[in-house]
Amino acid sequence: MDAELITAVAIGIGLAASTGFRVFVPMLVAAIAAKTGVLPLNESFHWLSSWTSIAILGTATVVEILAYYIPFVDNLLDTVSTPLAIGAGTLLLTSVLPIDNELMKWVTGVAVGGGSAAVVQSGSALTRLTSTKLTAGMGNPVVATVENVAATGTSILSLVIPFFIVALFLILIIFIFTRLRRILRKS
């Protein structure tokens, strides 16, 4: 396998999974990284590095971050964020894959990028619901802060040390599935 492909997949998975914490933070990080030449994008995704995209994603990032600090609104946002995270994860992985076959690129983007975003988003939503249940929403700003830091940190680290971040997300996915299985057994 080609080292460029393996690295691109690792970066894409890291960015895609980060959208499970926040949809727009990884998109903004990717846009800025592409604008500065740190992240090579496929030709059809160069629009992501435009100043217009950066401005829109920056605004959406600020709104998303602030909205998650409002108890109960944050739970409502999870219902909207889940499909958006899957779409953003798909887009981020697809945008960096150096594969010529468009169908294969998009299928991989949906399955791997969208899938990893969905799993992380599910764990994030489950954590927030648990926090809401246990603290009547008062602990949710702490959860939001951790998610904001995680989204920013994992997005940036995905560009710098992608293989470490992929390993970290694999551990997180295993943890989420283990917790979900325990919860389903109790029900």
Image (cartoon, grey):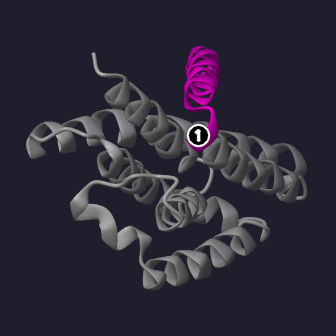
User: Residue 74, relative to residue 175: is it above or below?
Assistant: below
Question: How many labels sit on residues?
Answer: 1
Where are the magenta residues, as a range? Answer: 159-187
The one of 11 and 91 positioned closer to us in this rendering: 11
- Quarter assignment of residue 98: top left
Residue 157 in which image quadrant:
top right
Residue 37: x %, y % from top left = 48, 59
Q: Main secondary structure of the magenta part?
A: helix
Residue 169 forms part of the magenta stretch: yes
Q: From the top left corner, tell me how far across and down residue 90 is, in percent.
A: 34, 48
The quarter of the picture where the C terminus appears is: top right
Classify the position of the N terminus by image quarter: top left
- Is 26 covered by the magenta stretch? no
Q: Is residue 164 above or below residue 22?
A: above
Residue type, numbered disc 1: Ser
Task: Please give left or right for residue 81 compared with residue 4 in the image.
Answer: right
Q: Residue at x 89, y 49 (%)?
A: 135
Kindly identify the residue that appears in the image at 65 percent across and 78 percent down: 63
Q: Is residue 132 left or right of residue 48?
A: right
Q: Residues within 10 Å of mark 1 (few under 14, many from 20)?
A: many
Query: Residue placed at 64% from the left, 24% from the top?
Result: 168
The residue that appears at 37% across and 23% down in the rendered structure is 3
User: Which type of secondary structure does the marked residue at label 1 adopt?
Assistant: helix
Question: Which x, y percent locates residue 101?
Answer: 9, 40
The residue carrying mark 1 is: 158
